[in-house]
Amino acid sequence: MAVVRITQELIERVQKNIRQTMQAAVDAVEDSPPDLGAAALNIVLAPYKELLGQCPPEWFKRCNRVTLQSPKKSPVDYSVDSDLIDAVLVPIRFPDSAHYQTQVDHDGGVHIWLSGAVMWSEERTALESWARATNKIKADVHAAVEAARTTLEAFSTLSPALKAWPALWDLLPEDVKNKHHEVVTRAPKAAAPDVSASLDKLGGVTAQLTINKLKV
């Protein structure tokens, strides 16, 4: 096998492939927030429904999107959009409430901040759990990307890196694989460095690579 040097360019290409490999897992969590917008809007609008026929129409606006946003003292930030099947008439200005704050956009969206911890306890718990799960998987990907750098920087050539981290092979660009397979005279082996700490953070990447193979 040819001696392939581990360069900054190679490290960055491997890191890019890790992000691409893990993107499906990130999307699966990030794109599946609790769908609570329509229900929350119905609760907020309940006191105003009987006024629709009694007030001037210019006091209301048709909205087709709800955004639930974390209140100021929320332990985790979130912003979740829900498209409404049918447009709903909402007051252009809502009075202040201890349980929620609202803002109506010019483009047909209404933002709701669920400030009432008791009134919205189930909704806030679900939204915060989703936000934490999203933040965690993104943090795991970032940790894996940095662990890959730490692992690869411990080696000067590819062959010993592959022995320490076999799953690295699936993250290599094809031109690097082809170069590695070239037959040349072998150089004397050097002692392999200890990269066990950084490899522990790459378990999720290895698992996702295995899942991807099973899908083929």
Image (cartoon, grey):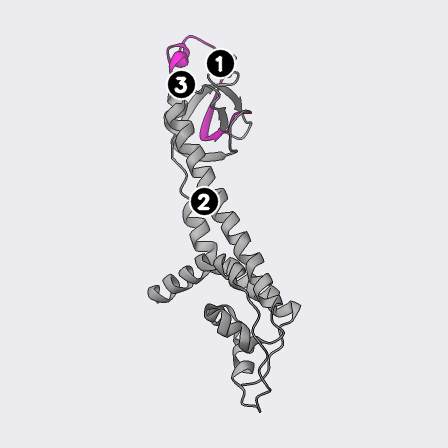
How far across and down, in percent of the image, does residue 214 sit? 33, 65
Q: Give the number of the disc on residue 98.
A: 1
In the displayed structure, 181 sits above or below 147; it is: below
Disc 3 secondary structure class: loop
Q: Earlier in the sequence, mark 3 or mark 2?
A: 2
Q: What amino acid is labelled 1 in the image?
A: Ala
- Tag 3 residue: 119
Q: What amino acid is labelled 3 in the image?
A: Met
Q: Is residue 82 visible?
A: no
* Residue 69 colored in magenta in the image: yes
How far across and down, in percent of the image, does residue 61 sit? 48, 22
- Magenta region: 45-72
Q: Give the number of the disc on residue 179.
A: none
Mark 3 to mark 2: distance in Å?
25 Å
Q: Residue at x 53, y 16 (%)?
A: 93
Residue 119 occupies quadrant: top left
Q: Residue at x 54, y 53 (%)?
A: 143
Q: Give the number of the disc on residue 30.
A: 2
